[in-house]
Amino acid sequence: MHLAIAGLTIEVTAAPDVTLALGPSAARFAVEPRTADVSVHASREPLSADISDELIFDSGGLWRLHRNGDGFLFRIFSSAFGPAPYKTARFANDFTSGTIALNAEHFGRNQPVDPLEYPLDELLVINLLGRGRGLEVHGCGVIAADGRGYLFVGQSGAGKTTMARLWLADTGTTILSDDRVVLRIEPDGVWMFGTPWHGEAPLASPARVRLSHVFFLQQSLHDRLEPIGAAAAAARLLASSFPPFHDPSAMAFSLQFVGEIVNTVSHSVLGFVPGPDVPQFVRCAGMDRRSQI
């Protein structure tokens, strides 16, 4: 099967006893076979809790990252399956090829499975982006009816899903995601892509749009727009992004990338009261407004 996320095509093949399947969100990103940016192969294997590879990063939750020769090894866990990982993924140093091992103790023969099921699909894309391609951001992405692309940035609880639902009622609007989008710089501007990794609302679209304005969400008693300087905007954008923190070169790229974003795209702080008038307020406020830099 082939997936296209943020302009990156992932080819997944599998051993004869593995039946490939996609969940509802990932299925929206399925594409016809094409030249792939990364190829992975899945198989059923016995997996052990023991490991000698160097631990690079522990998420404190579902996954851990290890150095594996010249490449990397992700180990994915679930409390339901005990101390051994239920899945591992080995990737080359540039993340363009890899193998996925599904724990044979938990995955039966020909059991339908998505080898890249979250969080592995997101981890793969984040690391691909960190190699000079772009950045995943914690935000709600909207394509307005007039074709403008608006990004609403904020941590959990800032109002991203609320904003997405307000725009859903606006005729002709496409919601790229209510939680995570990808930004990439192309010769004709900054582009925003939808991802399969949505928030409370199951909103995920494979569409893309040229980014017109970045709004940093803030609680408010009334709808208001405030300017924000480039340095402060870059800091807030980076704090609401998902770079590969374990990789110094990827972090250096991410720092440079957010600087380019805030120096290219207009940005403001947006305080809003949830209501049907918010989309129109945003359209008027972001039409041609530039932040004070």
Image: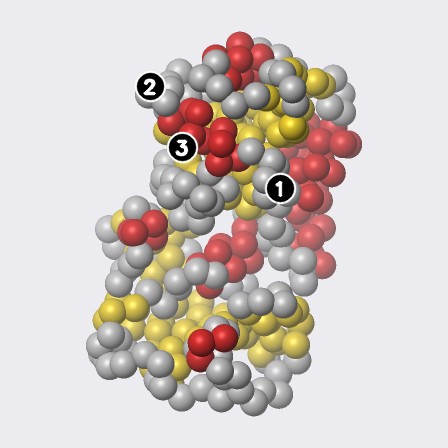
Residue 262 got which mark? none
State the residue in front, 51 or 277: 277
Identify which residue is drawn at 25% across, 69% down.
Answer: 112
Pointers 2 and 3 in contact (C-beta within 8 Å): no
Q: Quadrant of residue 159?
A: top right
Q: Position of residue 285 (x, y in %)?
A: 58, 12
Q: Residues within 10 Å of mark 2 (few under 14, many from 20)?
A: few
Q: What secondary structure is found at the residue carrying circle 3? A: strand
Residue 155 got which mark? 1
Q: Could you tell whether 82 is left or right of 202 in the image?
A: right
In the picture of the structure, the residue carrying the numbered disc 2 is: 171
In the picture of the structure, the residue carrying the numbered disc 3 is: 175
Identify which residue is drawn at 59% across, 27% down.
Answer: 214
Q: Residues within 10 Å of mark 3 (few under 14, many from 20)?
A: many
Identify which residue is drawn at 50% across, 42% down.
Answer: 179
Q: Amino acid at mark 2?
A: Thr
Q: Is residue 178 above or below residue 113?
A: above
Q: What secondary structure is found at the residue carrying circle 1? A: loop
Question: Which marked residue is nearer to the observer: mark 1 or mark 3?
Answer: 1
Q: Residues within 10 Å of mark 1 (few under 14, many from 20)?
A: some
Q: Position of residue 201 (x, y in %)?
A: 41, 41
Q: Could you tell whether 283 is left or right of 236 in the image?
A: left
Q: Amino acid at mark 1?
A: Gln
Q: Amino acid at mark 3?
A: Ile
Q: Position of residue 271 (x, y in %)?
A: 63, 22
Q: Position of residue 41 (x, y in %)?
A: 35, 72
State the residue in front, 217 or 14: 217
Identify which residue is drawn at 24% across, 51% down.
Answer: 32
Query: Looking at the rendering, in which quadrant would you find the N terminus?
Result: bottom left
Q: What secondary structure is found at the residue carrying circle 2? A: loop
